[in-house]
Image (cartoon, rainbow, N blue to C red):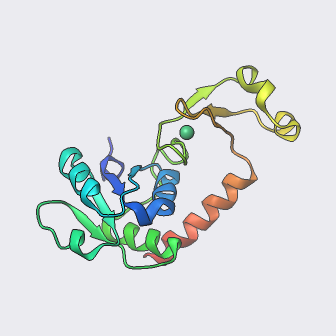
Amino acid sequence: MDEDGGAERKFLADAALGRLARYLRMLGYDAAYLKDRDGAAALRETLKTGRTLLTRRRDLAARDDIEVFHVEDDDVLAQLAATARRFDLTFTADAMARCIECNERLRSVSKADVLEELPPHVRKTQEIFARCPSCGRIYWPGTHYARAVARLLGALRRSC
Ligand SMILES: [Zn+2]
């Protein structure tokens, strides 16, 4: 049913690419992040998990025993556009279904379950909520979400 299988690809972003990992999560991709300055842990994790490594390091990008993409741009939206072009990424059915901070899949919660934790304006205006099982952060489709989607769409259009 998933013709392109795009969302099945899992990424591992190395130390310089934390913001790129967050954007990939917004699109619905499983993008782990590893704070690893010397690259050894990133290489080990890539070999162990079979994730596609996203790195700015030439030495890692040159390896032929892992799937790796060398990210050359400094700007995160340019990085996203280059990654989207390379792997044919798009919004997936999982878009906005992951915690942007933790990469965990969000769980739907009822408004009643989170009511006490919501800012007053959100309590008044929003009805659909999800929570990250790891950090507890609550998500709802608000204006921040809409702006993020617009920026992502702009970046992806530039990648075509
Ligand atoms: Zn989280």
- Give whichever of 107, 100 is nearer the camera: 100
Vertically, is 1 above or below 40? above
- Give whichever of 127, 73 is nearer the camera: 73
Left or right: 100 in relation to 13: right
Quarter of the image for the C terminus: give it: bottom left
Vertically, is 92 above or below 87? above
Q: Residue at x 52, y 32 (%)?
A: 134
Residue 112 in view (yes/no): yes
Instruction: Give the x, y percent position of residue 119.
Output: 83, 37
Instruction: Give the x, y percent position of residue 48.
Output: 19, 45
Instruction: Give the x, y percent position of residue 106.
Output: 53, 34
Left or right: 8 in relation to 47: right
Q: Which quarter of the rendered image does ligand 1 occupy?
A: top right
- Give whichever of 27, 35 is nearer the camera: 35
Residue 3 in view (yes/no): no
Left or right: 135 in relation to 60: right
Q: Residue at x 56, y 66 (%)?
A: 153
Q: Residue at x 11, y 61 (%)?
A: 65
Q: Residue at x 73, y 48 (%)?
A: 142
Instruction: Give the x, y percent position of residue 130.
Output: 62, 33
Asked which quadrant contains residue 149, the reply is bottom right
Vertically, is 104 above or below 67? above
Task: Give the residue at the far left of this rendering.
Answer: 65
Quarter of the image for the N terminus: give it: top left
